[in-house]
Image: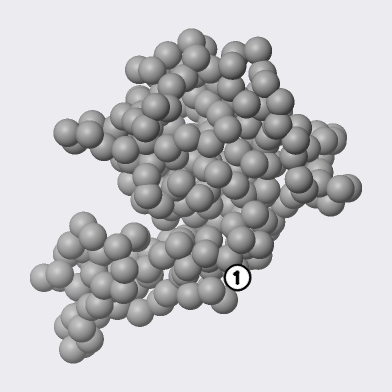
Amino acid sequence: MRARGHRARDGHASLTRPRLGAGGLTYHGVMATLTERQTLELYEKTGALMRGHFRLTSGLHSDIYLQSALVLQYPEHAARLGDALAAPFGDAGAQSVLAPAIGGILVAHEVARALGVRALFTERENGVMRLRRGFTLTPGERCLVVEDVITTGGSTREVVECVRASGGAVVGVGSLIDRSGGAAAFDVKRVALATVSATTWPPESCPLCKTGSQAIKPGSRV
């Protein structure tokens, strides 16, 4: 769908929104939905969901590794995932979509495109998550916070706090994958397209290591 931009009252560019039907967002009459199975199939067929013996950024070992960049590198997959994540928030009145850099940037862009609003991202400056690069929020601006993968929810909470500190209002939290098993809680509506249960162990007690297997670290995002 190609959207046409126009100038909104708050001074930000606004886009033509998809039609909101009784069942959610529709694009040319097609429902923007993905089942959990379909989401995980997209991840697996692009190599974005790997099974084996991995060393995570935290230092822990796991039998599951997620590298969302491998699925998001394909525009058609990124668009489909963005449409599906936008659909549950079609009636939230979001005026912008925000995500933490770097992993969430493409997710924010695709969800924002689907909702017909703008996409922003936050970055850490001196250890604090901030809006940079000239990004600003208007007072009371309704913001949807998204991520590619939520594990502990820490970076997502930092974005939520950044939005509120900047005068915005958070209307929901969305992620492509919930790796927390539902443990990461928020005080707003929360949606994930799929949940992945992955066990982690300290290296000294990793059962995979005890079998002689060596942990690998395929990339920089887990």
Coordinates of residue 160 in the picture (x, y in percent): 40, 28
User: The disc labelled 1 sits on which kind of residue?
Assistant: Glu
Q: Is residue 203 left or right of residue 135?
A: left
Q: In this rendering, does residue 193 appear at all?
A: yes
Note whether 10 is above or below 201 in the view shown: above
Q: Nearer the viewer, residue 212 or 218?
A: 218
Res 69 quadrant in image: bottom left
Q: Nearer the viewer, residue 186 or 135?
A: 135
Q: Residue furthest right?
A: 29
Note whether 173 is above or below 178 in the view shown: above
Identify which residue is drawn at 53% across, 17% down: 141
Q: Is residue 17 left or right of residue 127?
A: right
Q: Quadrant of the C terminus?
A: bottom left
Coordinates of residue 122 in the picture (x, y in percent): 37, 35
Identify which residue is drawn at 46% across, 46% down: 105
Note whether 20 is above or below 140 in the view shown: below
Coordinates of residue 22 in the picture (x, y in percent): 84, 35
Identify which residue is drawn at 34% across, 60% down: 221
